[in-house]
C-alpha cells in the first residue's frame, strides 16, 4: 500500500487515529452538555443546543481545541470533567504494534495533534503512548491549528522533515486537505475513528480502518 523505502518520517494524529475518538465524542456531545445543564439549571436539550452552536462558531480554530477557552466560556473545569470519564480513553487496535514496527524499520514517529497540552498530558499518562513516540507536538505550542497550511511550515522548523518523504495519518478531512495543500507526499485517512460509530465511506484520500493494514510490508522492511 505504501512505498516505505520512500518514507523517513511518519506524522501521526492522536484523537481518532491512535486513540479511539469515542472518548472525545462522548465527552463533548454528552458529558459536557449534561454537566453544563446541571450548572445552569437548564434542560439537557437546551444546553445541548446552545453548546452545539458555540462549538460550531470556533470549529477549526485553536479555541475549538483549547481546554482553557472552554473552561472560561462555560464556567466549567474541563480538565476535571475529562478525568470523570477518562476510563473511556483507549488506544486503537494494532497501534502499539505499528509504532514498534516503525521504530524497527528506522522511521521517525512524530505525534502531531490539535489537542491542548492539558488534554495531551492526560491522554499520554493514561495510555503511556509517549514511550512509543520520538517527538510529540501540540498545535498549541505552534500557535496554529493543523487546518491552517502555515502550520506545516512552522512544524518543519521544529521537526525538520522532508514533505516529499513524509507520511501523515489523520482522521480529519480538513486537516488532510491542509497537509496536501502544503505538499506532504503520503496521506492516509482513518475510516473508523470512533469504534462505536459506523465506518466512514469516504474516498477523497486512501484510508485504513486500523493499522493492521500497514503492518505486513512494514514488518518485512524491518526484518530486512
Image: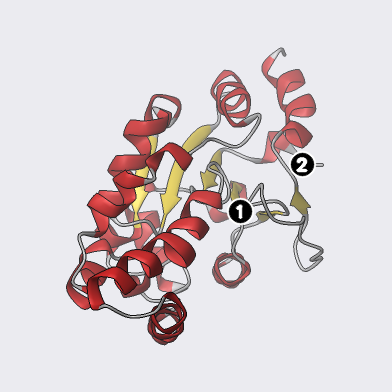
Q: Please report the residue visible at 48 percent of the width from the left and 72 percent of the height from the top.
A: 147
7 sits left or right of 160 in the view = right
* Disc 2, SS: loop
> Does residue 211 sit above or below 188 in this rendering?
above
Q: Please report the residue visible at 41 percent of the width from the left and 60 percent of the height from the top.
A: 31
Q: How many marks on residues?
A: 2
> Does residue 163 sit above or below 129 in this rendering?
below
Can you give x and y, in whole percent of width and height, for residue 131 in the image?
39, 24
- Badge 1 or badge 2: first in the primary sequence: 2
Q: Dot 2 corresponds to which residue?
A: 2
Tell me which corner region of the image, top left, top right, bottom left or bottom right, holds residue 175: bottom right
Q: Please report the residue visible at 43 percent of the width from the left and 86 percent of the height from the top.
A: 53
The answer to whether one can see residue 152 in this image is no
Q: Point out which mark residue 218 bears.
A: none
39 sits left or right of 32 in the view = left
* Disc 1, SS: helix
Can you give x and y, in whole percent of width and height, for residue 45 in the image?
47, 80
> Does residue 148 sit above or below 124 in this rendering?
below
210 sits left or right of 167 in the view = right
Q: Nearer the viewer, residue 182 or 122?
A: 122
73 sits left or right of 160 in the view = left
Q: Check the picture and name the quadrant holding the C terminus.
A: top right
Identify the colour scheme used. secondary structure
The answer to whether one can see residue 16 in this image is yes
Q: Nearer the viewer, residue 33 or 116?
A: 33
Q: Point out which mark residue 164 bears.
A: 1
Amino acid at each position: 500500500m505504501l512505498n516505505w523505502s520512500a518514507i523517513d518520517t511518519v506524522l501521526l494524529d492522536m484523537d481518532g487515529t491512535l486513540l479511539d475518538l469515542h472518548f472525545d465524542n462522548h465527552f463533548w456531545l454528552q458529558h459536557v452538555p449534561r454537566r453544563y445543564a446541571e450548572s445552569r439549571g437548564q434542560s439537557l436539550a437546551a444546553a445541548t443546543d446552545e453548546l452545539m452552536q458555540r462549538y460550531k462558531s470556533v470549529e477549526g480554530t485553536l479555541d475549538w481545541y483549547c481546554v482553557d477557552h472552554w473552561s472560561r466560556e462555560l464556567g466549567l473545569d474541563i480538565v476535571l470533567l475529562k478525568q470523570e470519564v477518562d476510563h473511556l480513553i483507549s488506544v486503537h487496535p494494532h497501534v502499539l504494534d505499528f509504532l514498534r514496527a516503525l521504530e524497527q524499520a528506522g522511521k521517525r514517529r512524530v505525534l502531531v495533534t490539535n489537542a491542548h497540552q492539558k488534554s495531551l498530558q492526560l491522554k499520554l499518562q493514561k495510555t503511556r503512548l509517549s514511550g512509543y513516540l520520538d517527538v510529540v507536538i501540540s498545535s498549541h505550542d505552534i500557535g496554529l491549528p493543523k487546518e491552517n497550511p502555515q502550520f506545516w511550515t512552522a512544524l518543519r522548523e521544529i521537526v525538520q522533515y522532508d514533505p516529499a518523504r513524509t507520511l501523515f495519518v489523520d482522521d480529519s478531512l480538513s486537516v488532510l486537505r491542509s497537509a496536501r495543500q502544503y505538499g506532504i507526499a503520503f496521506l492516509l485517512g482513518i475510516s473508523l475513528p470512533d469504534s462505536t460509530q459506523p465506518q466512514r465511506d469516504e474516498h477523497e484520500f486512501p484510508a485504513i480502518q486500523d493499522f493492521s493494514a500497514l503492518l505486513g510490508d512494514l514488518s518485512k522492511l524491518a526484518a530486512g
